[in-house]
Image (cartoon, rainbow, N blue to C red):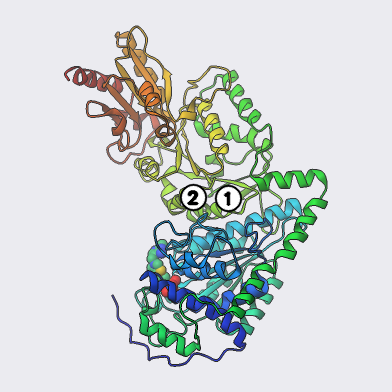
C-alpha cells in the first residue's frame, strides 16, 4: 500500500458558522464514531466528513416524515458511498424513524441487526436502496429521479413532485458506472436530481491523487450538469448551494463539497486512517475535546434530540397535504395512482397473456423467443401502463419496444420507453432505482453476453428482491455470426448462481408468455429472461391457461410404451432437440420423457415428491443446453450425460455453429445410449 505523509495532528476544527447546526451535525458524528468503536469495525471517516451537509439537507430541504418514511411523494435520499452507513443509521435514529432505535445503533454490524455493514433495503424503514458497491447508488438515484419525472408527467405536480438527493464519495466517481449514470442524467435533463460529492480527496490507499486526477467538476459540466463548488463544512454555503441547485430544474445538479474526512479526529482527520476501522478510545476522546462534546457514547443531549425529532416531523404537513390532494384528485386518476402505488396490477392484465398465447397457438408458427417476447409485450404494454421498457441500444434486437410505447426524451417524460444508450451497468442500476421508486415496472434489454456488464446491479436487484426485469436476448451460440465474443456460454450458469434471481429460459413462444406472466406476478422477485435470436418450433400447442412453467420444470412429454427409462432435460432453444431425440429413441423402443426446465429457481422451491415425479426414477438422464454444464450436473447425476458447450463458441451460421459443437438430436441420442448403459450397469 502506498504511504502518505502523516497529516499533522488537528487540534482544532474550523469554527462553525452556526453552533447549533454544528451541534446537530455532531450528533451524527458521535453516534457514528461510537458505533464503529463499539463494533470494532466500520467506516467513521465519511459520516464525520458529511455530517454538516446531511444536517442542512435533512433540516432545511429533504421532504421526509419519520412517522411514515415511505409515503409516496417523499424526497428520496441515496447514500451511494454506502460504507458511510452510520451516517444514514444515525439520521434515521435522530429523526425518529421507529425502526431505528439506539439499541440498533449499538448493534451496528452485528447479526440480525437493522444496522448491517452497508445500508440494506428493507432492513429498516427509511433505507431507499441497498448500497455499498460503489457507484451503483449514483445510478440508482438516476432511476429514482427518472421515475419521478415520468410519474409527474402522468399524474401531475399535485400527486408526484419530489427530489432525489444522492451522496457520493471519491470511490463512487472513480467507478465506471458513475460516468454512465452522470451521462444519462445529464442527457435526460433530470433536474430533480441533486448529487453531493464528498470531495475529501482520500480513499483507502491514501490520497486520491495516487490514482486519479480527473477534473470532476468539468466532467459533470461536460455531461450537462449544473455544478457548484463549496466548503462542505460551511452550513450557509451548503444551504445556499442546495437552494441554487433546486432553482435549476432543467439540469441535474452536482455540489462538490470540499470536506475533511474524519472531521474532528485529532490525528486521523484528513488521512486514510479515518476512512475505516475503530478509531480507538484516545482518538474519540480527542474528538470529544475538539468538538466540545460532553455526552457519553450513545447519549444525545435532550435539546438536540428534540431539534432532530422536529426535523423528522417537519414533513408531516407536506405529507397530509399531499394525501388531501390525492383524495381530491379526479376519481379515475386517483384510482390509477393508488393502484400503482399499492403495487397492484390492473385487474384483467392476465388477459394479455392469454391473448398472446392464443395467437401463438393459432398461428402455429416457429418463432424466436425474443420475437415471442416482443409479441407478449405488445399485449402487456396495452394492459399494464406502468411498464417502463428500454434497452441498452439494442431495441430492434431485444424486441423490447412494444407497440404504442412512446419514447422518453430529454425534458419530455410522458412516455414508457427508455433509450438507455450503450450503458448496460448504468441501465441495470437505474432500473433498480425505478423499481424501488414504485409506480413503474422497469424492464430493459441487452444481449445475454453483456449481462456481465449488468451483473453488479442484477445481483443487487436479487438481494433487494425488487422486480427489476432483465430481458437478455441472443442467449447462446445460436446467435451465430457475431462469434464467441457475443456468444454467452457461462452466463446462464453464473446468473443461475445468483441467489433469489429467477432466470427464465423459455423453450418456445407459449413458455415465453408463461414466463412473462410469472415475472409480473411476483412483485418481490428480480427476474432475467434469456431469449433466443434464432427461430424455434412451437412445442406447446395445447389450449387453456394452465401455466406449466410455474413450477420451474415440468414433463413436456411423458414416456410412452412402458415405464420411463430415460429423461431428457432441457431449457430454451435446445428444448426442441430434446423432443426430436425423444422421437428417435421412442422409435427405438426406449420409453423417454422430456422435461422442460425454464426456471431452476422455481423448480428448486418444489417439494421432493414433485421433483421426483418430474425427474423420474431412472438414473439414465441427458441434459442438453447450448451453454456450460455447471448446474445441470445436479439433475443428471453421475450416470447422466450432458450435451452442450465445453468452451467458447465460434463465428458462423447458427446451424453450422451447432453442428461444429455437436449439439443436435443425434448427439443427444448417442448420449442417451451411454447413460442407459451406465445406469443399467448399476
Ligand atoms: C465496487 C466497490 N469496489 C470497492 C469497494 C471497497 N471500498 C469501500 S470504500 C472504498 C474507498 C472509497 O473511497 P471514498 O469514496 O473516497 O470514501 P471515503 O474514504 O471518503 O470514505 C473502497 C475501495 C466497494 N465498496 N465497492
Q: Which mark is residue 461?
A: 2
From the viewer's side, name the closer residue of 104 and 537. 104
Tags 2 and 1 touching, CB below 8 Å: yes
* Residue 67 image point, x, y percent: 65, 61
Q: Earlier in the sequence, mark 2 or mark 1?
A: 1
* Residue 420 image point, x, y percent: 56, 53
Callout 1 environment at 10 Å: few (<14), some (14 to 19), or many (20+)? many
From this viewpoint, which residue is outermost toward the left?
681
Vertical arrangement, residue 384 with respect to residue 637, above or below? below
Residue shown at the point (58%, 50%) measured from the top left = 435
Q: Is residue 215 visible?
A: no
Q: Is residue 175 visible?
A: yes
Query: Residue 268 occupies which quadrant of the picture?
Result: bottom left
Q: SS of the residue at dot 1? A: helix
CA gap between label 2 and label 1 equals 9 Å
Q: Which residue is mark 1?
A: 435
* Residue 535 image point, x, y percent: 48, 28
Residue shown at the point (36%, 25%) measured from the top left = 569
Residue shown at the point (74%, 50%) measured from the top left = 154
* Residue 97 image point, x, y percent: 59, 63
User: How many marks do you count on the picture?
Assistant: 2
Q: Which mark is residue 462?
A: none
Q: SS of the residue at dot 2? A: helix
- Ligand 1 quadrant in view: bottom left
From the viewer's side, name the closer residue of 394 and 111. 111
Callout 2 environment at 10 Å: few (<14), some (14 to 19), or many (20+)? many
Amino acid at each position: 500500500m502506498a504511504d502518505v505523509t502523516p497529516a499533522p495532528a488537528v487540534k482544532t476544527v474550523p469554527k462553525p458558522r452556526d453552533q447549533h447546526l454544528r451541534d446537530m451535525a455532531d450528533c451524527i458524528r458521535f453516534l457514528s464514531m461510537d458505533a464503529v468503536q463499539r463494533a470494532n469495525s466500520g467506516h467513521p471517516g465519511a459520516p464525520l466528513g458529511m455530517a454538516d451537509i446531511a444536517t442542512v439537507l435533512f433540516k432545511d430541504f429533504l421532504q421526509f416524515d419519520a412517522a411514515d418514511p415511505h409515503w409516496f411523494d417523499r424526497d428520496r435520499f441515496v447514500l451511494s458511498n454506502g460504507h458511510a452507513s452510520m451516517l444514514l443509521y444515525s439520521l434515521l435514529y435522530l429523526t425518529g424513524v421507529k425502526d431505528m432505535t439506539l439499541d440498533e445503533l449499538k448493534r451496528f454490524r452485528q447479526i440480525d441487526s437493522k444496522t448491517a455493514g452497508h445500508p440494506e433495503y428493507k432492513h429498516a424503514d427509511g433505507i431507499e436502496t441497498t448500497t455499498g458497491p460503489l457507484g451503483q447508488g449514483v445510478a440508482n438515484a438516476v432511476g429514482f429521479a427518472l421515475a419521478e419525472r415520468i410519474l409527474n408527467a402522468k399524474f401531475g405536480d399535485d400527486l408526484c413532485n419530489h427530489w432525489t438527493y444522492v451522496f457520493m464519495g471519491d470511490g463512487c466517481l472513480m467507478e465506471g458506472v458513475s460516468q454512465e449514470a452522470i451521462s444519462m442524467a445529464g442527457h435526460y435533463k433530470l433536474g430533480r436530481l441533486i448529487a453531493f460529492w464528498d470531495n475529501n480527496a482520500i480513499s483507502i490507499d491514501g490520497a486520491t491523487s495516487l490514482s486519479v486526477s480527473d477534473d470532476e467538476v468539468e466532467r459533470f459540466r461536460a455531461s450537462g450538469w449544473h455544478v457548484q463548488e463549496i466548503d462542505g463544512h460551511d452550513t450557509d454555503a451548503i444551504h445556499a448551494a442546495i437552494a441554487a441547485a433546486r432553482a435549476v430544474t432543467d439540469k441535474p445538479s452536482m455540489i462538490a463539497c470540499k470536506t475533511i474526512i474524519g472531521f474532528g479526529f485529532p490525528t486521523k482527520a484528513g488521512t486514510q486512517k479515518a476512512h475505516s476501522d475503530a478509531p480507538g478510545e484516545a482518538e474519540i476522546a480527542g474528538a470529544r475535546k475538539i468538538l466540545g462534546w460532553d455526552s457519553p457514547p450513545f447519549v444525545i443531549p435532550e435539546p438536540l434530540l428534540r431539534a432532530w425529532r422536529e426535523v423528522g416531523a417537519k414533513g408531516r404537513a407536506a405529507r397530509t397535504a399531499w394525501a388531501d390532494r390525492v383524495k381530491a384528485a379526479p376519481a379515475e386518476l386517483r384510482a390509477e395512482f393508488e393502484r400503482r402505488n399499492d403495487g397492484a396490477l390492473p385487474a384483467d392484465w392476465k388477459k394479455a397473456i392469454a391473448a398472446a398465447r392464443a395467437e401463438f397457438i393459432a398461428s402455429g408458427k416457429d418463432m424466436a423467443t425474443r420475437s415471442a417476447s416482443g409479441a407478449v409485450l405488445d399485449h402487456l404494454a396495452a394492459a399494464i401502463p406502468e411498464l417502463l421498457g428500454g434497452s441498452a441500444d439494442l431495441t430492434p434486437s431485444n424486441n423490447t419496444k412494444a407497440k404504442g410505447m412512446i419514447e422518453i426524451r430529454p425534458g419530455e417524460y410522458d412516455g414508457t420507453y427508455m433509450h438507455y444508450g450503450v450503458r448496460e451497468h448504468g441501465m441495470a442500476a437505474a432500473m433498480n432505482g425505478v423499481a424501488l421508486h414504485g409506480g413503474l415496472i422497469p424492464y430493459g434489454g441487452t444481449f445475454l453476453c453483456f449481462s456481465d456488464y449488468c451483473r453488479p446491479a442484477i445481483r443487487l436487484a436479487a438481494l433487494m428482491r425488487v422486480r427489476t426485469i432483465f430481458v437478455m436476448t441472443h442467449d447462446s451460440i445460436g446467435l451465430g455470426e457475431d462469434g464467441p465474443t457475443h456468444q454467452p456460454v457461462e452466463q446462464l450458469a453464473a446468473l443461475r448462481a445468483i441467489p433469489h434471481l429467477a432466470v427464465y429460459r423459455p423453450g418456445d413462444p407459449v413458455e415465453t408468455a408463461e414466463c412473462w406472466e410469472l415475472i409480473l406476478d411476483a412483485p418481490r422477485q428480480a427476474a432475467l429472461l434469456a431469449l433466443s435470436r434464432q427461430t424455434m418450433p412451437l412445442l406447446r400447442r395445447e389450449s387453456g391457461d394452465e401455466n406449466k412453467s410455474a413450477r420451474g420444470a415440468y414433463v413436456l412429454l411423458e414416456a410412452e410404451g412402458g415405464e420411463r427409462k430415460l429423461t431428457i432435460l432441457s431449457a430454451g432453444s435446445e428444448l426442441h432437440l430434446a423432443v426430436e431425440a425423444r422421437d428417435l429413441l421412442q422409435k427405438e423402443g426406449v420409453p423417454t420423457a422430456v422435461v422442460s426446465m425454464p426456471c431452476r429457481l422455481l423448480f428448486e422451491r418444489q417439494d421432493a415428491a414433485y421433483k421426483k415425479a418430474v425427474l423420474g426414477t431412472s438414473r439414465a438422464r441427458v441434459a442438453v443446453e447450448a451453454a456450460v454444464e455447471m448446474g445441470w450436473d445436479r439433475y443428471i447425476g453421475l450416470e447422466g450425460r450432458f450435451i452442450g458447450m465445453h468452451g467458447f463458441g465460434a463465428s458462423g451460421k447458427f446451424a453450422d455453429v451447432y453442428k461444429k459443437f455437436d449439439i443436435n438430436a443425434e448427439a443427444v441420442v448417442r448420449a442417451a445410449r451411454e447413460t442407459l448403459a451406465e445406469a443399467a450397469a448399476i
